[in-house]
Image: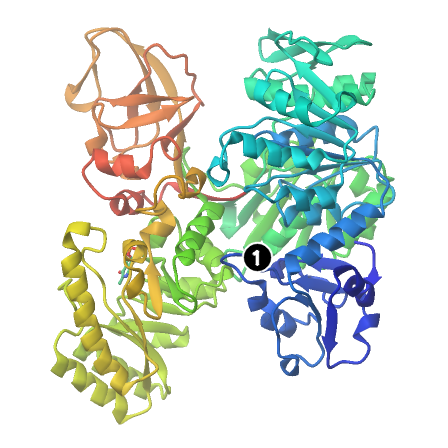
């Protein structure tokens, strides 16, 4: 953003400045951030402490201050005495303040703004319009899918004097939200894509949802919509004057401003168009219905502005699928790869660099960037290099690789010694894997540079089967469970057993950033691995083994002490190492009949030992419920709680500050009165809410997707048998797809012979014959499926629960049973 003073910001947001330092009003600000991780420019940065339902930015102030940040926009009272150099700008509501600042920024710019809303396709229409127009007009667009109450203000701050068109996406999830967005964007033109079922839950009905969305267009001179969506079209036609309407139809709807006709040509579609003034056609490399609709919206906007030129027309032919995510995977020689499939521009680069800085998988990894020439056409090569160099400065890159003639020509602008290549081919010809070791590599290439070829040489080689872990979905689940907690109740997350199969370091890192209070691992080695990766969150070890006591103390790992002998030996180890007040946790046995202190005498004896010296301190005592998920057994759960109270009272007599905790995932959902000081979340984080009705289980977000690729397709003649044991029989001529996943991967053999199904291109197909160790066969008779086609073994369509039910087990076993040789890939939307 453009530099301004704190006094000016205070005036716009009508806030009051408080500081123990002299003249805070004169401080200059040029960066706003809502995310503590993105604060790299500390002196001139202003941190906006937002309060969400489950997340409070004020919690980060202390650590930001200690990292050198001095300016904070807050709505809670902060004791300035603790922060003598800080300036606090106090407002009633920090989100409204952020929005007011954005609206003021927008009002200063006369550049025309196009706003896009609707249920599906917003981001794609935005991205496509950008790629169609940015060589003609200096265009800016919202980064990624920044379209929310927070994302829209951040998008608007990117507007600068020189822009000729701004494309801003607006999304709402409940009634009443659009007014704020309208005020910030104040669009000149609007596109509404469609009204689907998404988010319907928060609206009384479809009419209310449509009316709310249309509020965005109050100031527009033109609204673009599809006349074939009759409900939407009549709402627009009733609300806005005719000169504002600009509609398109692919079904000859009378009165539409633009008539379209689609002609499919193998993998492409020719879109013929006709308006009252012009006729012509564009060709797009897509055939699907959704792509046609998105392209038609983009086309309608371009025609409505009279911007169709030969260059724009030919750009349609090169539209690309829009991928909106970063993917983390393991690379060769202990490297990690972060692949940014997003278009190449400065906004998304900055987001990706921040993500990279926070996701090194071990503290030994150093950051590296491989980047191609960017799409920015409006600046000279030297300007491009300078701007990039400035953007990279705050990030500590130990390796920088520039690919393309534009950047290479100006490599001397960069702070890090850069390696230069004129093309991806040249890079690959000179590639030596030994030059890539212990690096956290961000790959950021414009489409034409085909960075997937670079990813292929840097990627660790595994077979085609992978488990994709969606960290965003995981955080959504975490937030759902947190929303069930009373204030001050802490959260421990169970990351034992490789985080229930999803992976340890990456998951623990994501959780520690979310400020969960505790992580729990099964054995000391798992905890050491997390510490080595830089995880600072307190960690409890559920099964502390004698030989690992010293290792645990060295890495601040806290033991679960479940018996008197274990207590004795841990205390002796603590005395030997002369530690004081080392934190431990006592397990109490209340009905599982597994581990824990069950006798009061035994417990008393341990407590006497505790009080005899200063070596240990009980941080918490806890027990585990045996039937928290079974309503028929609630009596037993209540008894367990009674017993827990009795035993934990004894502990608290000796150690009054000891916390208590009892609930696991199902318990959190079913026994709100038993939360005490902390809860222990496990399966719910990985598999989603266990009891929540479908509407509140967030939009079907899946944490773990298990996928593979068809490796072979063949025809088996009637009468033949398929696989070991000849159990699979072809009663008619059968088509079979072979996929490279077997019981050694965790694809349970009990799924053989039609019990298990997989999902390929929109349909379920059964397993045929016995599942083998490394592969299995699928009956795809009647379908045309080719080798290389993606297969979902578990995910949105084949649910984890369904898979567990089919073989008579629980989701825990299926998830933790997915073998380590299945590569884990982490995605962040
Ligand atoms: C694994 C575990 C949990 C988590 O249980 P979920 O049912 O997965 O939520 C909680 N407490 C203890 C002691 C555990 O071992």
Q: From the viewer's perspective, is 405 left or right of 603?
A: right
Work out which quarter of the rendered image holds the C terminus and state it: top right
Please say whether residue 420 is visible from this viewpoint: no
Q: From the viewer's perspective, is 481 left or right of 77?
A: left
Q: Position of residue 57 (x, y in %)?
A: 58, 63
Residue at position x 55%, y 17% from top?
A: 288
Residue at position x 74%, y 50% from top?
A: 418
Q: Position of residue 672 (x, y in %)?
A: 31, 60
Q: Position of residue 557 (x, y in %)?
A: 37, 72
Under circle 1, the secondary element is: helix
In this rendered view, identify the residue nearer to me: 205 or 792.
Answer: 205
> Is 551 rendered above or below residue 418?
below
Residue at position x 41%, y 62% from top?
A: 529
The coloring applied to the image is: rainbow
Q: Position of residue 344 (x, y in %)?
A: 69, 38
Crowding around mark 1 (Cα neighbors within 10 Å: few <14, some 14 to 19, many 20+) is few
Q: Which residue position is annotated with label 1?
A: 358
């Amino acid at each position: 953003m453009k530099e301004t003073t704190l006094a000016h910001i205070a005036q716009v947001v009508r806030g009051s400045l408080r500081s123990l330092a002299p003249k805070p009003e004169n401080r200059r600000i040029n960066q706003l951030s809502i995310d503590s991780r993105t604060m790299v420019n500390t002196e001139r940065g202003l941190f906006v402490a937002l309060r969400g339902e489950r997340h409070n930015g004020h919690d980060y102030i202390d650590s930001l201050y200690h990292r050198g940040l001095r300016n904070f926009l807050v709505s809670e009272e902060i004791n300035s005495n603790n922060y003598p150099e800080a300036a606090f700008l106090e407002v009633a509501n920090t989100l409204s303040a952020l929005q007011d600042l954005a609206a003021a920024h927008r009002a200063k710019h006369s550049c025309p703004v196009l706003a896009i809303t609707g249920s599906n396709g917003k981001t794609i229409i935005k991205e496509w319009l950008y790629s169609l127009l940015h060589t003609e007009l200096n265009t800016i667009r919202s980064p990624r899918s920044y379209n929310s109450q927070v994302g829209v203000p951040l998008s608007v701050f990117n507007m600068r004097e020189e822009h000729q068109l701004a494309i801003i996406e607006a999304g709402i999830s409940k009634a009443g939200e659009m007014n704020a967005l309208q005020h910030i964007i104040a669009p000149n033109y609007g596109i509404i894509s469609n009204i689907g079922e998404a988010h319907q839950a928060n609206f009384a009905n479809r009419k209310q949802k449509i009316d709310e969305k249309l509020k965005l267009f109050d100031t527009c001179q033109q609204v673009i919509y599809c006349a074939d969506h009759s409900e939407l079209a009549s709402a627009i036609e009733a609300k806005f004057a005719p000169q504002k309407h600009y509609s398109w139809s692919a079904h000859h709807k009378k009165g539409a401003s633009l008539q379209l006709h689609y002609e499919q040509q193998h993998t492409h579609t020719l879109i013929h168009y006709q308006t009252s003034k012009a006729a012509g056609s564009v060709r797009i490399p897509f055939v699907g219905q959704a792509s046609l609709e998105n392209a038609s919206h983009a086309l309608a906007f371009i025609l409505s502005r009279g911007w169709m030129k030969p260059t724009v027309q030919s750009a349609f032919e090169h539209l690309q699928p829009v991928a909106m995510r970063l993917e983390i995977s393991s690379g060769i020689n202990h490297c990690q790869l972060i692949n940014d499939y997003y278009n190449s521009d400065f906004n998304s680069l900055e987001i990706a660099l921040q993500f990279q800085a926070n996701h090194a998988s071990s503290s030994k990894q150093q950051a590296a960037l491989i980047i191609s020439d960017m799409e920015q056409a409006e600046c000279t090569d030297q300007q491009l290099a300078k701007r990039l160099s400035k953007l990279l400065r705050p990030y500590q890159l130990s390796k920088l690789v520039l690919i393309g003639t534009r950047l290479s020509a100006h490599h001397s602008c960069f702070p890090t010694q850069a390696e230069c290549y004129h093309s991806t081919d040249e890079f690959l010809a000179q590639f030596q894997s030994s030059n890539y070791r212990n690096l956290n590599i961000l790959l950021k290439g414009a489409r034409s540079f085909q960075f997937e070829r670079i990813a292929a040489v840097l990627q660790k080689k595994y077979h085609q089967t992978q488990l994709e872990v969606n960290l965003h979905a995981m955080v959504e689940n975490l937030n759902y469970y947190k929303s069930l907690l009373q204030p001050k109740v802490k959260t421990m997350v169970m990351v034992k057993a490789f985080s229930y199969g999803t992976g340890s370091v990456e998951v623990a890192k994501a959780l520690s950033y979310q400020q969960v209070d505790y992580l729990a691992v099964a054995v000391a080695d798992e905890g050491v691995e997390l510490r080595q990766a830089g995880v600072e969150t307190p960690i409890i070890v559920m099964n502390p083994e004698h030989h690992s006591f010293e290792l645990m103390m060295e890495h601040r790992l806290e033991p679960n002490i479940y018996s008197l002998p274990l207590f004795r030996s841990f205390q002796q180890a603590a005395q030997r190492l002369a530690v004081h007040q080392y934190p431990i946790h006592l397990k109490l046995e209340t009905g599982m009949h597994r581990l824990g202190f069950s006798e009061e005498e035994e417990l008393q004896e341990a407590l006497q030992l505790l009080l005899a010296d200063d070596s240990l301190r009980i941080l918490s005592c806890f027990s585990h419920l045996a039937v928290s998920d079974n309503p028929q057994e609630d009596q037993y759960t209540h008894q367990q709680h009674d017993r827990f109270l009795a035993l934990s009272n004894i502990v608290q007599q000796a150690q009054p500050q000891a916390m208590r905790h009892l609930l696991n995932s199902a318990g959190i959902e079913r026994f709100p009165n038993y939360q005490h000081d902390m809860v222990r979340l496990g399966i719910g984080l990985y598999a989603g809410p266990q009891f929540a009705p479908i509407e509140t289980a967030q939009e079907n977000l899946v944490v773990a997707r298990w996928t593979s690729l068809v490796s072979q397709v063949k025809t088996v003649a009637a009468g033949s048998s398929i696989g070991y044991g000849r159990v699979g029989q072809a009663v008619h001529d059968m088509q079979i797809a072979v996929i490279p996943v077997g019981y050694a991967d965790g694809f349970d053999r009990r799924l053989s012979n039609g019990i298990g199904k997989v999902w390929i291109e929109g349909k379920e197909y059964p397993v045929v014959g016995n599942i083998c160790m490394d592969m299995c066969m699928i009956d795809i008779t009647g379908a045309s499926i080719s080798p290389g086609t993606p297969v979902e073994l578990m995910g949105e369509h084949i649910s984890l629960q369904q898979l567990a039910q089919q073989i008579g087990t629980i989701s825990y076993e299926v998830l933790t049973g997915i073998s380590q040789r299945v590569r884990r890939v982490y995605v962040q939307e």
